[in-house]
Image (spheres, grey):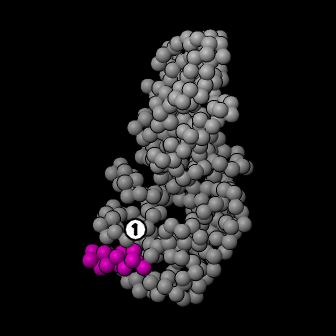
Amino acid sequence: MKAVVINKQDLRYNIEKIKEHTNVNLPDDNGNAVKIIAVVKTNGYGLGIVEYTKFLIDNGIDFFAVSTIEEALKIRDAGIKERLLMLSSTSIEEDIRTLIDNDVIITIGSKETAEIADKVGQDLNKTIRAHIKIDTGFGRYGFIYSNREEMIKTLKTLKNVKIEGTFTHFSNSYYDDKYTKLQFKRFIDCIEILKMNEIQTGMLHACNTSAFIKFPNMHLNAVRIGSAFTGRISFKNSVGLKKVGYLKANIAEIRELPKGFNIGYSNVYKTKRLTKVAIVPCGYSDGVNIQTGRDMFRAIDKIRYIVRDCKDVLKKQQLYVKINGQNCAILGRIGTYHVTVDITGKDVKINDEVIFNTSIKHVDSSVRREWN
């Protein structure tokens, strides 16, 4: 049976490394050290959102963030009471009420959301906890940084909302340092304007994982850490993080294929000799060869990876798995649910364990998570 295996010791090591890298030399307004906000979206980056969140709590993390209402409810339904921020802004009143009912800090990124949140607070006779999102050049959620008059006017009218934080999100901090610095400047300029207009900004945070590692001067009052905990980052790992989690499965079939025999869809691979192969029930649906570092979770994006994989096969770019400590080549295209592996000349048997060094955040949540 396939499973995602998580090594607790390596994850604990990464948590400590991240704590060490947090810029404690830039305390917040109350003199506190920079806060770590653990982003546990995408099923806890593949680790399993509930067990992962509980593990982080046991290791000193007490502030979390998610991207969907479903993620927030999973955490609350598991009895987790720690601070929880919904990073996405919504103007749907029913969604806002659901978040408030479950003690989730909402994000306000528009005049419409602000008005609805204020109304809900009045209806419930309750002060709504919120962070303000400023769009400094991502084009998704948030008050547009240049439209300061509307932002100031909107925030000044709030009567039933307490602003506990203000943040922005970098669009390309993995690769584009110049644009990241520009976004940061836009954010700081907005904060100064808000403060000049006597608007409380609360906790300030801008850094995602890549900016957290690359730009310590941007840590502000808090940092949002996601993929860094798993050590699976798509830029230079200068902090010494370990890769956490791998996918394992067992060999279901072993076969001998004659020379000149096609393997996989589209006939892009043909055996060059008598070849002994293992059939392993893991494929694209389990995240095999789906690369980290791109926001892609839709079916169409996985199709694009299939096309890319065809090209990789034609270019003879070889992919490997580990069986009994040995590297074994994947032959032909990766299927949705299966791969074919060359085990010619190797001592390999049915039911032997196969290890895929794949991006675990793309492994379906129905696959068992095994914590060691």
Residue 12 lies, in percent from the top left, at 58, 43
Image quadrant of residue 157? bottom left
Q: Main secondary structure of the magenta part?
A: helix
Residue 52 visible to the viewer: no
Taking depth in this image into account, of 189 and 278 the one nearest to the observer is: 278
Quarter assignment of residue 177: bottom right
Dot 1, how many residues are within 10 Å of its Cα: few (below 14), some (14-19), or many (20+)?
A: many
Residue 219 falls inside the magenta stretch: no
Q: Locate residue 174, reporting x and y percent.
A: 66, 56
Q: How many numbered marks appear?
A: 1
Q: Is residue 88 visible?
A: yes
Whether residue 48 sits left or right of residue 347 in the image: it is left
Answer with left or right where residue 180 lies relative to residue 94: right
Q: Position of residue 115 (x, y in %)?
A: 37, 79
Q: Position of residue 91 (x, y in %)?
A: 37, 71
Q: Residue at x 69, y 57 (%)?
A: 175
Residue picked out by circle 1: 90
Q: Amino acid at mark 1?
A: Thr
